[in-house]
Image: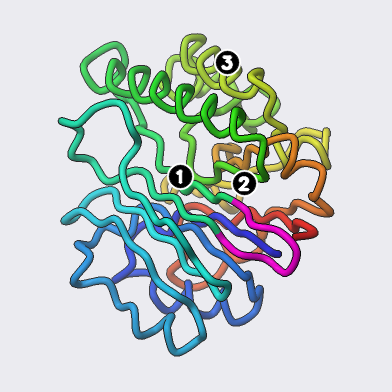
Amino acid sequence: MKIASFNINGIKARAGALTDWLDEAEPDVAVLQEIKSIDENFPRELFEERGYQVETHGQKSFNGVAILSKLPLEDVTRGLPGDDDDEQARWIEATVMGDHTAVRICGLYLPNGNPAPGPKYDYKLAWMERLKARAEALLEAEEPALMAGDYNIIPQDEDAKRPEAWAKDALALPDSRAAFRRVVNLGFTEAFRARVQSPGHYTFWDYQAGAWNKDDGIRIDHVLLTPQAADLMTDCQIDKEIRGREKPSDHVPIWVNLDA
């Protein structure tokens, strides 16, 4: 089961780039972030004609997440539990039925948090507390599950080409990193780092200042696996090269293979 995560930075602007990548990479499941579309306007037919079931949790002009799956989806839920007043579309999850086992897949778009300090940063940290509570529940179920998406967290300095440029950014502040570690340390495996320990691997390059040409990137898209899912992992990679294509997102996909 190949499961990918991709912040597409707007479905209208990136539909062609997304379908080209889907046709090449052929993930069984893709979780998308920043679709920037209400559910009714999402171009589902583009994906349904490719054999994907489409589930969205959209919002006008901002945020928005989706799951595309060639495998049967069950028990789809939308919204991160813990705050009934939160109207931002940042969380979707479903159970995907594999050949031998079911996997609970959670797609997330974690708040950016800038400027920090401030209300947006407070929201980010509060959202991460809710994420931790959901993560604990996933572990308690003792089943294969993963949380994949744009975490807007640079876990360590080695995850940025120029860590000093991000030192005061909400993506790398000590409280942000600590909140991320609290989730991982519950018992999750950070899929990419379980496979690759070296620096110099990124998932985001800004559109400004020639960041892509300088490889001035950061690694902020992550896949966290429960122990039961980690036991099934056979690979995890970043599809870096598509950042250099025409009209790209500023993110690239990260994907895992599970023997499920």
Q: Is residue 212 above or below residue 37?
A: above
Q: In the rendered structure, which amino acid carries the disc numbered 2?
A: Lys
Name the image quarter holding residue 202.
top right
Looking at the image, which residue sits at the far bottom? Answer: 49
Q: Which mark is residue 214?
A: 2
On screen, residue 226 versus residue 149, left or right, reads right
Q: Is residue 39 above or below residue 104?
A: below
Task: Looking at the image, tell me whether mark 1 or mark 2 is earlier in sequence order.
Answer: 1
Q: Is residue 177 above or below residue 196?
A: above
For the N terminus, the image quarter is: bottom right
CA–CA distance in space, label 1 to label 2:
9 Å
The label nearer to you, 1 versus 3, is: 3
Q: Are marks 3 and 2 in contact (CB under 8 Å)?
A: no
Of residue 125 and residue 214, the one placed in the foreground of this image is 125
CA–CA distance in space, label 1 to label 3:
34 Å
Residue picked out by circle 1: 209
Instruction: Provide the secondary structure element on which disc 2 rests.
Output: loop
Whether the magenta-drawn stretch holds residue 260 is answered as: no
Name the image quarter holding residue 43.
bottom left
Of residue 223 and residue 175, the one placed in the foreground of this image is 223
Task: Looking at the image, tell me whether mark 1 or mark 3 is earlier in sequence order.
Answer: 3
Residue picked out by circle 3: 182
